[in-house]
Amino acid sequence: MIEPVLDVRGLTKRFGALVASEDVSLDLRQGEIHAVIGPNGAGKSTLIAQICGALTPDAGSVHLAGRDITGLSTPQRARAGIARTFQISALAMENTVLQNTMLGALGATRRRPSLFRPILRDQGLRDRAEAALAQVGLAAHLQRPVADLSHGQRRQLEVAVALAQTPKAFVMDEPMAGLGTSGTHDLTTLLDGLRTQAPILLVEHDMDAVFALADRISVLVYGQIIATGTADD
Ligand code: ADP
Ligand code: MG
């Protein structure tokens, strides 16, 4: 059996009497988009927070490419290869599209920026950032401040920041939220092409997007996975 890229085993998280994650297990395999769906309050964001390190589980483990990352901090997990997107506030509005992408990508590298080698002149980093921005369709907007971008373009930029980290896995919490029809269509097309670079764990409300994209779907209700299968299932 091929080892999954991301392997979540028995995650349990309690908030007082509420069990927000109850023995949740799922995996993410090379080349796939695995969607997690479920009603509001089902525990989707709590699950993502435990995978990315923002919340510590009461029980269970998270492995990335065979490595136990359960005890790592969020930045350590990013460096290990988990790229979480759609943290809007993580974008610096006054900085340019290119600067945001380079700084985001740098966050996932081990190298410390040097005083003598300003990071924004690092050619390798710049090449990676520009390639990511070209892939998401922002090549013409490198020098624009993020504040000038449309909502849809900011989502594309968040994907570029993740992509420039050359991650092992993408984790996305409701990327389509707040996008109109054309924005959702554009982002769906973008994510569709992304899975070959790294698999995507996708929490999403938009069922059209889920059925268009997901190779597998897991249904989370009251903190428990009640079913996992293909879209056809
Ligand atoms: P979803 O993302 O599926 O809408 P959440 O993971 O945000 O669900 O929430 C799952 C449940 O856990 C909800 O009942 C929510 O109120 C509760 N919850 C989430 N975060 C906390 C917290 N920090 N403290 C207490 N309860 C929380
Ligand atoms: Mg949520």
Image (cartoon, helix red, strand yellow):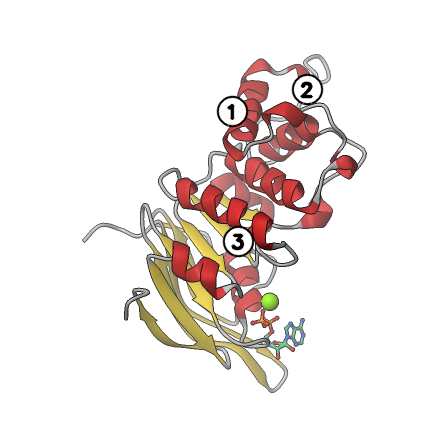
Q: Secondary structure at mark 2?
A: helix
The answer to whether marks 3 and 2 mark residues whose Cβ atoms lie closer than 8 Å is no
Image position, residue 43 (x, y; %) = 54, 73
Distance in Å between CA atoms under marks 1 and 3: 21 Å
Distance in Å between CA atoms under marks 3 and 2: 27 Å
Three-letter amino acid code at the position of disc 1 = Ala
Q: Secondary structure at mark 1?
A: helix
Mark 3 or 2 closer to N-term? 2
Three-letter amino acid code at the position of disc 3 = Met
Task: Give the residue at x 51% y 24%.
Answer: 131
Pick the front one: 90 or 33: 33
The answer to whether marks 1 and 3 mark residues whose Cβ atoms lie closer than 8 Å is no
Q: Looking at the image, is 118 positioned above or below residue 153?
A: above
Task: Give the residue at x 63% y 26%.
Answer: 112
**Residue with the mark numbered 3:** 172
Asked if disc 3 is less than 8 Å from ligand 2, the answer is: no
Residue lying at the far bottom of the rendered structure: 17
Mark 1 residue crowding within 10 angstroms, few (<14) / some (14–19) / many (20+): some
Ligand 1 shows up in the quarter that is: bottom right
**Residue with the mark numbered 2:** 120
